[in-house]
Amino acid sequence: MNEISHDGLRYSGQQGESVTVTVEAQNTVSMVVYTLNGVTQPLPAGQSIQFQLGAGTTTLQLVLDSAPSGGTYRVVVRTVSNEANNECVHTWTHLGSLMIEDFTFFA
């Protein structure tokens, strides 16, 4: 898979390609909910999101909260061949309101 836009959270790959997204909470209690292709569920601390790219577009939305405010989330998308260590790393700091991040994967 290749990253198309780092800030736009867009990636392209082949249908059936495996994707792993890890979410690591730092200085906060992990409070993460994700929606993958319309299905919403909590993401327990220490677990990752794994899926295969479907035909067309696959969407992943992360909703991140923090208690106390100011916690940081490190989100890593694997396997991204045009990034160092085949990982695309995003870091977001909670500033008082929910953080909602929308990823788009194209096959």
Image (cartoon, grey):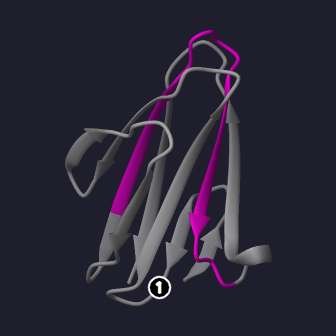
- Can you say whether 103 is above or below 3 in the image? above
For label 1, the crowd category at 10 Å Cα-Cα, with few meaning under 14, some 14 to 19 and many 20 or more, is many
Q: Is residue 27 left or right of residue 21?
A: right
Residue at horizontal 80 percent and vertical 75 percent from the top:
84
Q: Residue at x 32, y 72 (%)?
A: 57
The secondary structure making up most of the magenta span is strand
Which residue position holds label 1?
A: 13
Is residue 11 found left or right of 51 in the rendered image? right
Q: Position of residue 79 (x, y in %)?
A: 58, 77
Q: Which amino acid type corresponds to the residue marked 1 in the rendered image?
A: Gly
Of residues 67 and 7, the one nearer the viewer is 67
Residue at screen point 34% across, 69% down = 51
Farthest residue in the right direction? 84
Q: Position of residue 44 (x, y in %)?
A: 40, 37
Residue lying farthest to the left in this orientation: 39
Quarter of the picture holding the N terminus: bottom right
Quadrant in which the C terminus is drawn: bottom left
